[in-house]
Image (cartoon, rainbow, N blue to C red):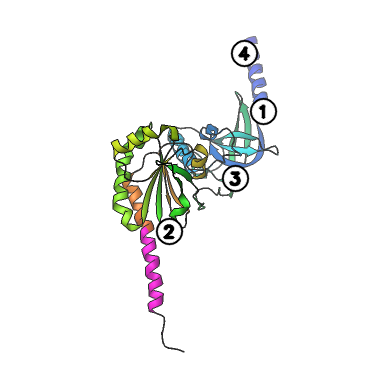
Amino acid sequence: MKKIILLSFVLLIANISLFAQAKTQKLNGQIVCSSCWFEEEDRNKSPYGNTADIECANDCSKKGLSQSIAVKNEKGEFTLYQLEKGSLDLKAKDFLEFVPKYAEIEGVTRESKGKKFIKVNSLNVVKVAQTESVQVDAKLALNDLSGVPQDLKTYIGRFVVVNFWATWCVPCKEEMPDLSAIQNDYAALGVQVIGATADAEKDKAKVLKFVREVKVNFPVWLNVTNDQMLGFGVGKVLPATVIVNREGKIVWRKVGKIDAIELRKELDKLLDEKVAHSKMKKAKVDNTSLVPA
């Protein structure tokens, strides 16, 4: 009997302790992947939400890894609260659909083993992260294999496929034939493929050997940096590919090995838009009356 009373007392104390830790709070922050968030040391310098982050979040969700809300304090420091299902009616198994949006969450918070959690009772999106939806300028200036400075801005007026790669990257080598085929098939349509390798200029001989062996038929620029790749919204993952439109804006991104069919469809869509625009302008001219009013 004494043992039962003692056990009941211990359980009561434990429940009181858990109740004391749990409290209802309102948190404002960005919904992120609990794992991918930590791939960058300073999220103030490398904001969360680029293509690499989103693809990572999708992969983590498939593996059953959770999402969190990243809450920033006045000092610019972030605290992550892992999201748990509460009374909020979720349509999916987790909170992936809200990544990388900014939201206000109300729920019960708790701590366990040094981590913070919040059981989500309500979630209101307050802002969409302006990462993928906003077209940004493509800025890239590197030396080519002849040591001549090159700049992406000289390609204004053409569609450019920029592929980030390296000689030591196996999937990069595997996708080169597809990129060379695209260069062949689309060059006459105003499309230019450019390969920006992470290999340093001192390793130019290695790059030249790679280019000859794989039969690369497009310009190759040397020594692209992580910061430059981050500027294109693809993180630091190789390979990665972007499409830059005729105005010099990034309009499509892919992290990882390309799907040649997907890339061709994107180019066809952009070229169709260009043709449609030209036809519209021509129609307006044709319909303009030449007789003075």
Query: Which of marks 1 and 2 precedes in the sequence?
Result: 1
Residue 68 visible? The answer is: yes
Neighbour class for label 3 at 10 Å: few (<14), some, many (≥20)? many
Query: Which of marks 4 and 2 precedes in the sequence?
Result: 4
Q: Quick check: is 66 in the magenta stretch?
A: no
Please identify the quadrant where the N terminus is shown: top right
Contact between marks 3 and 2 (CB within 8 A): the answer is no
Residue corresponding to mark 3: 103
Which mark is drawn over residue 4?
4
Neighbour class for label 1 at 10 Å: few (<14), some, many (≥20)? few
Cα gap from disc 2 to disc 4, whole angstroms? 82 Å
Residue corresponding to mark 2: 157
Q: Nearer the viewer, mark 2 or mark 4?
A: 2
Contact between marks 1 and 3 (CB within 8 A): the answer is no
Which mark is drawn over residue 21?
1
Q: Nearer the viewer, mark 2 or mark 1?
A: 2
Q: Is residue 39 above or below residue 270?
A: above
Type of amino acid at the residue the image marks with label 4: Ile
Badge 4 marks a residue whose secondary structure is helix
Query: Which of marks 2 and 3 precedes in the sequence?
Result: 3
Cα gap from disc 1 to disc 3, whole angstroms? 23 Å
Frontmost residue, 60 versus 37: 37
Cα gap from disc 2 to disc 1, whole angstroms? 60 Å
Residue appearing at x 36%, y 64% in the figure: 275
Instruction: Write the start and end of the magenta stretch as one range.
Output: 271-293
